[in-house]
Image: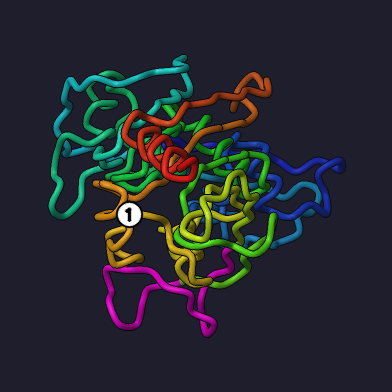
Amino acid sequence: MPRRFHSVITEADSGERLDMFLSKAAGVSRNRVQSMIERGLVKVDGAPVKKNHLLSRDETVEWKVPDAEPEDMTPQELPLEVLLEDDDIIVIDKPAGMVMYPGPGHPENTLANALLARHPTIAGVGGKGRPGVFHRLDRDTSGLVAVALSQRAYDAMVDELKERRMERVYLALLVGDIAAEVGSIDAPMGRSPHDRKKMAVTPAGGLRAVTHFKVLERFDRDYTLAEVTLDTGRTHQIRVHFAYIGHPVAGDPDYSRGKSARRLDLERQFLHATRLTFDHPVSGERMSFSSPLPEDLAEVLKSLRRMRGR
């Protein structure tokens, strides 16, 4: 059964927006509060209201917090490289090839299956099907990813992402020689109109997507190693943005047509989440983690450097 709460508005809270007040009172993110309001789980003086309703003194706000939906995925004992683990959050160095959560074509052996075995109480955190996942890495992108183990952590991390306090840094090997040393790609994204399995830059109706880059190393005119950071987190954002400007991620099977993969002996895209920095969702402590390039990508760089030295 949903848990029920209520609060009587005091003079100090008079004039505040409903969603902002309830986020503090219920201890959940504004996104979740707004979802509760849309679902009719919040009432003011017994009547449903909009999220931007301005509260008045002596009004009574009532809300229901729904129980977490049970997960139907199978817990699996899988090896994980864990860098941080407490009651609220876990940071993992994800290997290439591991999918974040079950979906078509990969019903098991995912990170979510492994976490459900390790932390059964993660079931339902953030919603059914993607327990604790507030940001993600593609299957063949390796590196650092954090997952919330409690609802309070999930709500806090969703807000942190929205407010851009979480820093995600990637290493990407790009095809060709990018002219600028630093730059930004600000191009809206959505589903590709030609292939619904892919994403694309979609000027009409797309969601804003912003990617920043800094060149770290150049390999003649063939490849560029770049450090990449994100303001937004759209699906396949890095891969789509660099393909859009004519410098796709090397080895990308979907957006670079795989030509560089054969030349470099790559079996996946050269994309690695190398650094992750965020405020702990409960203590507020600023935390930073790093992950070196895995062996397959490090070998590609060694080979390029040898060729450059000839």
Is 127 on the left or on the right of 35, as rendered? left
Residue placed at 51% from the left, 50% from the top?
Answer: 219
Q: Is 257 positioned to the left or the right of 108 in the image?
A: right
Q: Residue at x 62, y 39 (%)?
A: 167
User: Quick check: 211 left or right of 59?
Assistant: left
At 70% across and 45% down in the image, what residue appears?
A: 21
Instruction: Please state the extent of the stretch shown in magenta in the rendering.
Output: 190-209
Where, quadrant-wise, is the N terminus in this rendering?
Answer: top left
* 137 lies above or below 118: below
Task: Identify which amino acid the numbered label 1 is placed on.
Answer: Gly
Q: Residue at x 58, y 36 (%)?
A: 156
Residue at numbered disc 1: 251
Whether residue 292 is situated above or below residue 228 in the rendered picture: above
Q: In x, y percent, where is residue 153? A: 52, 30
Judged by its main secondary structure, the magenta piece is loop
Q: Magenta includes 201? A: yes
Is residue 204 at all visible to an observer of this figure?
Answer: yes
Q: Is residue 14 left or right of residue 105?
A: right
Magenta-colored stretch includes residue 138: no
Q: Position of residue 82 (x, y in %)?
A: 39, 18
The reply to whether residue 128 is in sight is no
